[in-house]
Image: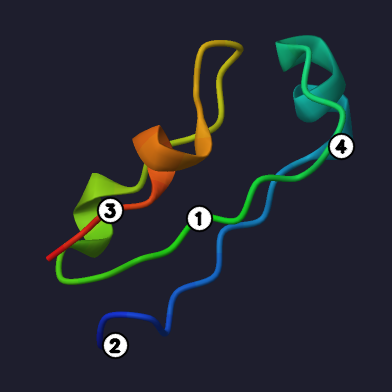
Amino acid sequence: MKAGDQLLTVDLKQIEDAGLSTITPVIITSAPEKIVTPTKAATMDDIILEN
């Protein structure tokens, strides 16, 4: 599996529990092990991982 191949599935209930109204895309780059899950404090910049 190379960068960009991995999909993150997020349970809609978890999103509601986190206070998020939309699913935030998670971009996997060079380090799939660094996947971050959306939290109440997460912003788009926080969860887009760069090389």
For mark 3, what is the residue? 49
Question: Of the numbered discs in the image, which one, if any, rests on residue 1?
Answer: 2
Q: CA distance from mark 2 to mark 3?
A: 17 Å
User: Dot 3: within a 10 Å radius of its alpha carbon, few (fewer than 14), some, or many (20 or more) residues?
Assistant: some
Q: Are marks 3 and 4 in contact (CB under 8 Å)?
A: no
Q: Nearer the viewer, residue 46 or 9?
A: 46
Q: Which residue is located at x 43 percent, y 63 percent?
A: 27
Q: Position of residue 36 (x, y in %)?
A: 39, 38
Q: Which residue is located at x 50 percent, y 23 percent?
A: 42
Q: CA distance from mark 1 to mark 4?
A: 15 Å
Name the secondary structure under disc 1. loop
Give the label, 2 or 3, closer to the camera: 3
Using residue 41 as the reference point, say whether residue 4 is left or right of it. left
> Which quadrant holds the N terminus?
bottom left
For mark 1, what is the residue? 26
Using residue 15 as the reference point, say whether residue 36 is left or right of it. left
Name the secondary structure under disc 3. loop
